[in-house]
Amino acid sequence: MVDATPGILTSLNTGSIDGGAGERVLIDYKEALMDYKVAELPVMQFFADPMTTDTGGDIDITFAKPSMAMEQIDEGNTPQYQHTKMRSERVAVKEWGIAVGVTRRMIEDSRFNEVEMALNEARRAVDRHLTQHVVKVIFGNDAADATLGTIAITASTAESAITNFSSNPQGGFFGTGATFDGRLDDYANQGLTALQACNSYNAATSAGTSSFALTDIAGAISRMSKLGYNASHLFMSPSHYENMLKMTDFVTAFTTAMGTNGSIQTQGNLMPTAPEDNPFSSMLSTGGLVGSLYGLQVIVNPYVPSDRIGIFDLSTKPMAYVERRPLTVEEANPGFGIVGSYMSMRYGLKIVRPEAGQIIIS
């Protein structure tokens, strides 16, 4: 007589005291592939005015500057003729690409859909690249990036270094020493001294890693107001957020009177996440917007540098993003699809409204 021997790697073979082999389940990883969690920061939605163009090469964007003034004239005389002043910003467009290493053997022999996995990861790589590019330009990195063509910007970086577009073609916000001869424009009743003091990069008043002080936020709001902008958003890293949570001024919950589908919420402190109620619904459903401080919408994201926080008036986008050609597949071997092919795109970006941002560096 032959006794049946149950499989040792099935959930049917239970009873082991120590939960050994009898408690294990054999899993086919073909059916258990899971994507890693993707951190996102919708940088184009927040910071850029996207535009497309049919012309090749670099793109010039022109801004009008305050240039005319009324004058009193005597009877029979004519006023002096005045002309307009312009400021031009050139957005350098470059080509970027990624080659996906998928071979015919991989497609034929793999238990997985190699093409789908490779294309999904390539798409994420493009998203990561654009996010990191925008973040380094917007926040001013603490070290130069030769690949992206950015320079290190600190609280003492001069305006002349930021506007030296031969070494820093993507620009930045206002550095120290900005004058009316450059990007700084006269505004309202603010004098030359007040406007020149509105540097965009300022050191935090409190010492320590990821330091956070309310006086820094108030100072940034004041400097932006003198330039005619009203701060609307506050971006910070998770380490800054930890320090901010220790302050009593931070409002972590939204009001209960937020509308949802035209009605009024009656229970819970909820922010509407439906697309018809909130343009940031996709971000709200996955985190990011965590509350408000001094009327600023607080955004926490791991892409934000751990030594910097940013205050912006996002009713006016500070950056221009020019896409000459979207991401396309270039077939190196026609007829073989993704095998031996690569993807590329042509784009450029630059800070064109430096008045709309303030960076605090700890």
Image (cartoon, rainbow, N blue to C red):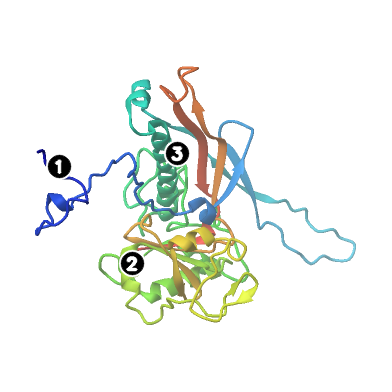
* Foreground pick, 328 / 315: 328
Q: Residue furthest front?
A: 1
The x and y percentages for residue 251 are: 44, 78
Q: Provide the secondary structure element on which disc 2 rests.
A: helix
Do the residues under discs 1 and 3 have CB atoms within 8 angstroms? no
Q: Provide the secondary structure element on which disc 1 rests.
A: loop
Count of marks placed on residues: 3
Position of 165 relative to 80 (above/below): above
* Relative to 278, 24 lies left or right: left
* Foreground pick, 273 / 215: 273
The x and y percentages for residue 96 are: 45, 33
Instruction: Kindly identify the residue that appears in the image at 79 percent across and 67 percent down.
Output: 72
Residue labelled with disc 1: 4
Position of 234 relative to 142 (above/below): below
* Foreground pick, 132 / 276: 276
User: How far apart, in angstroms, are the residues tagged by discs 2 and 3?
Assistant: 34 Å
The x and y percentages for residue 81 are: 78, 53
Instruction: Kindly identify the residue that appears in the image at 33 percent across and 32 percent down.
Output: 111
Residue type for callout 2: His
Can the viewer see residue 362? no
Q: Provide the secondary structure element on which disc 3 rests.
A: loop
Q: Earlier in the sequence, mark 1 or mark 2?
A: 1
Residue labelled with disc 3: 166
Residue labelled with disc 2: 240
